[in-house]
C-alpha cells in the first residue's frame, strides 16, 4: 500500500486507545502485550490510511483506491472493513472512527475517554457481551496506558535483539513487486511457487505465505522484516511480464546488515518459468547450504502454449482461493481452475485447485450441489495421484477429501506425511490439528494449530486455528483459556457461527450465563440458519471424549436459547 499523507502534516508514529496501539511504522494494530490484534488485512490497511491522516476526513474514493487498488469492489467492502475496525477497537459509539456524511471517515487523533469501564482487554475490543460497568474500575485508562508503554518497550527490546537470536537458516519471502505488464495474480503465483519449494526444506525456519502476504504493498525494509519475524534472511523480488517473456529479479538479503547475500536477474520465455523458479530456489538453497532434493529437476520443463494459458488461469484461481474465506471467492476460484483443466487436463496445479475449491465449498456448506462437488473433487484427486502422488497439492487434496468423509485417522496420516515432507507449510499442521481434535487428542491438537500459527502468524486462516485451539481447550475443561482463543477467532471471522457458540458455552461454564445468552442471541441473529442440530451434523466423530465435549456444548447452547 503506497502511503500518500498530506505533506504538510507531521505524522505520529503511534496512535493509542485503551487496549491498543496503532503502529504506523510497523503497519500493525497491537494489543496491550504488543501482539498483532488479528484485524483482517484489508481492514488493517483502511485503519492505517486513516491513521496516516488522523484528525482529517479521508474520502471513500481515496480509501477504496489505496486499499483495493485496481480490484473492483463495491462500497460494501469499505463499510465492512470500517465495521471490523470498530468491533475490534470496541468503538460501539463510533467515537474513534467517525462517519462524516457524504464525505468519508475520520480517525479521531485524540479519542475521548471511555464513558464506561472495561474489566479486561478482551472485553475492551468486542461488542459481544460486555460486562456491566463497575465504577471502581475507572482507573483502567491509566493502567492500560502503563501496559501499552511496557508493551512498546518490550517490542523495541525484542526487535533490537531478534537478529542475533534468529537461526542462521531462517527465511522469509516478501511478496514480489510487479512492474507494468505483470498482473497481481501472476506475481503472487511466482511468489507462491518459490515459497512452496522452500516449504519442503528441513532444518530451516520459514515464515508462512499467509503471514508474508500482509507485507504486500508496504515497501518493507528487509531489516525491519527480519526483526519483526525473527529471521536471518529475507527474499525480495520483482517480476515483469512483457508478452511471452518474463523477467524475474530476486535477492537474498541478510536481515542483520541489509546486505545482499545473493541475487539473480533472469529474462526467459513464459514457458520456461517453472524451471526459472526452480533455479531461483536452487540459488537460495546453495547460499543457505540447504539440501532440497529434486525440487528443481521436477519443475524444470518447458510449457507448451496451451499449458501456459492453463497455468495462468490456475495462478489466478489460486490467488482467489488463498485471498480470503468466502463463498464468492472460492466459487470464482473453482471456475478458473475448471477453465484451466479444460485447456490442460494433466495440469497438476489446475487439478489440485479443482479438488480443493470443491472440498472447501463442501466443508463450509457453501456448495449448491454437495454430491456433485464431492464427485468432482474425487475425480481431480484421483488424476493427481496418477500424475504426481507426492506433490504437496496432491496430498492436500486427499486430506481435504478425507475430512469430507470424516476419516480422521486418514486426515492424520496425510497430515503426518505433509509435515514430514513440507514441515514449513502451515496447512500440514492444520490438517493434523483438525484430525487430532476429533480423535480426542486435545493437547496434541492445540500444539499442531499453535505450530501453524508460529509458521504463519498473520495468515488468513489464523481465526480458524484460534477457533480449533479454543475448542480443544474447552474439551480439556480450560474454559478461561478457551474464552480467550475463541474471542480472537470470532472477532477475526464472525462468518463462522460455531466458534461463537463454543465461546458462549465457555462463558456459561464460568458462571456468566447472561453474557453467554446475549452472545447466543447475537450469533442466532447473524446466522439464522444455524441450529442445535448443526453442531452434531458438522462435528462428527466416534471418540467418546470428543463426543462428550461436543454434546456438552450443544446442551449449553440449547439452555441459552439456540433454536433446535
Image: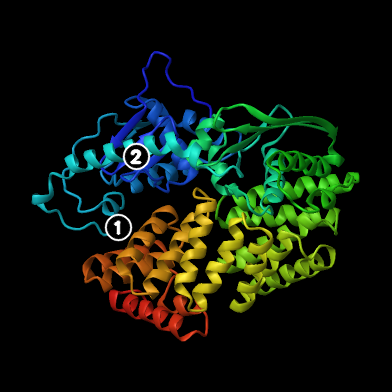
- Residue 459 in picture, x, y percent from top left: 53, 50
Residue at image mark 2: 154
- Tell me which corner region of the image, top left, top right, bottom left or bottom right, holds residue 278: top right
Label 1, on which residue?
128
Residue shown at 42%/18% (left/top)? 6
Q: Secondary structure at mark 2?
A: helix
Near-viewer residue (168 or 490)? 168
Q: Give the farthest residue toward the top.
A: 8
Q: Quadrant of the C terminus?
A: bottom left
Would you say 534 lies left or right of 417 here? left
Mark 1 and mark 2 in contact? Answer it, CB < 8 Å.
no
- Taking 87 as reference, is 242 above or below it? above
Q: Is residue 544 visible?
A: yes
On screen, residue 513 above or below 189 = below
* Residue 380 x/y as whole percent: 77, 66
Residue under the image location 81 percent in, 49 percent down: 310
- Earlier residue among tags 1 and 2: 1
Amino acid at each position: 500500500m503506497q502511503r500518500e499523507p498530506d505533506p504538510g502534516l507531521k505524522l505520529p508514529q503511534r496512535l493509542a486507545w485503551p487496549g491498543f496501539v496503532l503502529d504506523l511504522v510497523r503497519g500493525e494494530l497491537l494489543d496491550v502485550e504488543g501482539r498483532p490484534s488479528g484485524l483482517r488485512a484489508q481492514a488493517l490497511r483502511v485503519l492505517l490510511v486513516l491513521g496516516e491522516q488522523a484528525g482529517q476526513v479521508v474520502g471513500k474514493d481515496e480509501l477504496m483506491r489505496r486499499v483495493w487498488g485496481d480490484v473492483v469492489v463495491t462500497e460494501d467492502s469499505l463499510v465492512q472493513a470500517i465495521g471490523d475496525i470498530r468491533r475490534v477497537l470496541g468503538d460501539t459509539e463510533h467515537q474513534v472512527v467517525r462517519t462524516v456524511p457524504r464525505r468519508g471517515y475520520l480517525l479521531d487523533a485524540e479519542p475521548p475517554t471511555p464513558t464506561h469501564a472495561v474489566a479486561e482487554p478482551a472485553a475492551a475490543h468486542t461488542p459481544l457481551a460486555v460486562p456491566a460497568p463497575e465504577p471502581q474500575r475507572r482507573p483502567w485508562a491509566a493502567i492500560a496506558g502503563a501496559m501499552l508503554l511496557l508493551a512498546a518497550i518490550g517490542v523495541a527490546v525484542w526487535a533490537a535483539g531478534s537478529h542475533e537470536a534468529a537461526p542462521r537458516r531462517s527465511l522469509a519471502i516478501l511478496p514480489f513487486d510487479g512492474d507494468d505488464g505483470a498482473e497481481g495474480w501472476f506475481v503472487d503465483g511466482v511468489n507462491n511457487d518459490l515459497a512452496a519449494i522452500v516449504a519442503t526444506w528441513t532444518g530451516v525456519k520459514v515464515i508462512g505465505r499467509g503471514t508474508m502476504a500482509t507485507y504486500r504493498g508496504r515497501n518493507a525494509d528487509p531489516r525491519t522484516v527480519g526483526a519483526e519475524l525473527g529471521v536471518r534472511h529475507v527474499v525480495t523480488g520483482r517480476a515483469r511480464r512483457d508478452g511471452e517473456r518474463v523477467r524475474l529479479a530476486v535477492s537474498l538479503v541478510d536481515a542483520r546488515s541489509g546486505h545482499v547475500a545473493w541475487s539473480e536477474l533472469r529474462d526467459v520465455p513464459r514457458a520456461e518459468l517453472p524451471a526459472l523458479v526452480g533455479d531461483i530456489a536452487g540459488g537460495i538453497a546453495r547460499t543457505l547450504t540447504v539440501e532440497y532434493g529434486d525440487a528443481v529437476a521436477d519443475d524444470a520443463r518447458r510449457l507448451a502454449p496451451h499449458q501456459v494459458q492453463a497455468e495462468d488461469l490456475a495462478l489466478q484461481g489460486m490467488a482467489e482461493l488463498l485471498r480470503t474465506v468466502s463463498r464468492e471467492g472460492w466459487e470464482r476460484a473453482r471456475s478458473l481452475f475448471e477453465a484451466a483443466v479444460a485447456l490442460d487436463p494433466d495440469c497438476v496445479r489446475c487439478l489440485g485447485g479443482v479438488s480443493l475449491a470443491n472440498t472447501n465449498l463442501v466443508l463450509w456448506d457453501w456448495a449448491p450441489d454437495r454430491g456433485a462437488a464431492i464427485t468432482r473433487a474425487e475425480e481431480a484427486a484421483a488424476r493427481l495421484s496418477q500424475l504426481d502422488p507426492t506433490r504437496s497439492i496432491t496430498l492436500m487434496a486427499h486430506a481435504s477429501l478425507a475430512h469430507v468423509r470424516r476419516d480422521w485417522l486418514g486426515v492424520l496420516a496425510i497430515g503426518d506425511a505433509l509435515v514430514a515432507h513440507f514441515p514449513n507449510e502451515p496447512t500440514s499442521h492444520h490438517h493434523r490439528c483438525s484430525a487430532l481434535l476429533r480423535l480426542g487428542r486435545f493437547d496434541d491438537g492445540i500444539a499442531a494449530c499453535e505450530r501453524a500459527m508460529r509458521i504463519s502468524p498473520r495468515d488468513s486462516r489464523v481465526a480458524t486455528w484460534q477457533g480449533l485451539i479454543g475448542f480443544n481447550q474447552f474439551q480439556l475443561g480450560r474454559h478461561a483459556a478457551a474464552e480467550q482463543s475463541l474471542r480472537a477467532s470470532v472477532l477475526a471471522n464472525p462468518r463462522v457461527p460455531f466458534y461463537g457458540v463454543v465461546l458462549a458455552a465457555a462463558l456459561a461454564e464460568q458462571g456468566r450465563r447472561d453474557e453467554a445468552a446475549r452472545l447466543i442471541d447475537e450469533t442466532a441473529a447473524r446466522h439464522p440458519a444455524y441450529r442445535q442440530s448443526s453442531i452434531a451434523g458438522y462435528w462428527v466423530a466416534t471418540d467418546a471424549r470428543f463426543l462428550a465435549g461436543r454434546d456438552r456444548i450443544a446442551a449449553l447452547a440449547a439452555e441459552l436459547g439456540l433454536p433446535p
